[in-house]
Image: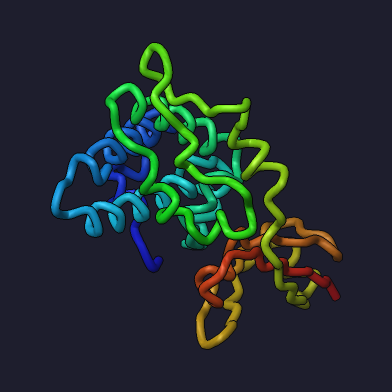
């Protein structure tokens, strides 16, 4: 694994979903640049790191893939899942309640904001200390359904009938990087095994790797 996301969030590998959410929100408040005067650049990098970790561990499916294959994520992935996006929205309320700014988020998520007429600067502290968005804007509309899926790569693996019954592990090499592919027992001809966001590890960019299993 390129990074230990559990270590970044300071939780055990057996941590519950709630433990992971609490750890993320606590660290996000700690590393907000307004709370680190003179060390804003360092705080931004730490914020990116914990967002990347939470974007994977905060999503049950991505966490399962990470535990099996060690696939990585990006900070912007936090908007791609309702599980992590809703927690980020709660975090923004935490920022508003603490009187912390949102401007720095434009730099954190600069890549995902390209081509979108949106800025986190539209957020302001609302009544009751919550983060409000003028004009009824919501993050799901901007980053959820409107977010195009990252490109995927497809490979084909041929195995014997005996291997299909027992299941096996095979190494996939791509750009001089190795990924371990687990083929489950009882797999049928034509089954597709998805390595979620595995292109982050092999190509340095988001995208799944799809393995088509052929059984002789």
Residue 203: image quadrant is bottom right
Q: Is residue 60 left or right of residue 14?
A: right
- Residue 137 visible, this angle: yes
Q: Which residue does the image show at 70% across and 57% down from the upper left?
A: 149
Give percent across and percent down for residue 95. Answer: 34, 30
The residue nearer to you, when weighing 215 against 43, is 43
Work out which quarter of the rendered image holds the N terminus and state it: bottom left
Residue 18: image quadrant is top left
Q: Is residue 12 left or right of residue 70?
A: left
Q: Which residue does the image show at 31% across and 40% down from the upper left?
A: 28
Q: Which residue does the image show at 54% across and 76% down from the upper left?
A: 202
Farthest bottom residue?
176
Give percent across and percent down for residue 49. Answer: 35, 55
Give percent across and percent down for residue 188. Answer: 83, 60
The residue nearer to you, when weighing 63 against 140, is 140
Q: Work out whether 178 lies above or below 64.
A: below
The residue nearer to you, when weighing 171 against 22, is 22
Q: Which residue does the image show at 56% across and 54% down from the upper left?
A: 113
Farthest top residue?
128
- Residue 67 visible, this angle: no
Work out which quarter of the rendered image holds the C terminus and state it: bottom right
Q: Is residue 145 left or right of residue 180?
A: right
């Amino acid at each position: 694994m390129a990074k230990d996301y559990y270590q970044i969030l300071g939780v055990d590998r057996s941590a519950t979903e709630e433990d992971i959410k609490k750890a993320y929100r606590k660290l996000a408040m700690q590393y907000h640049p307004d709370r680190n005067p003179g060390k804003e650049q360092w705080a931004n990098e730490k914020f990116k790191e914990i967002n990347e970790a939470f974007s994977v561990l905060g999503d049950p499916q991505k966490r399962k893939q990470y535990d099996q294959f060690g696939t990585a994520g990006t900070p912007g992935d936090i908007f791609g899942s309702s599980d992590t996006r809703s927690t980020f929205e709660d975090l923004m309320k935490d920022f508003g309640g603490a009187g912390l700014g949102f401007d720095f988020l434009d730099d954190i998520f600069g890549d995902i904001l390209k081509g979108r007429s949106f800025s986190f600067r539209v957020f302001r502290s609302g009544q009751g200390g919550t983060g409000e968005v003028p004009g009824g804007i919501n993050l799901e509309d901007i980053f959820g359904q409107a977010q195009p899926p990252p490109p995927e790569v497809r490979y084909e693996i041929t195995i014997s009938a005996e291997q299909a019954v027992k299941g096996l592990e095979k190494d996939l090499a791509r750009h001089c990087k190795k990924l371990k592919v687990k083929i489950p027992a009882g797999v049928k001809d034509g089954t597709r095994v998805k390595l979620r966001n595995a292109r982050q590890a092999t190509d340095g960019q988001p995208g799944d790797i799809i393995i088509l299993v052929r059984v002789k």
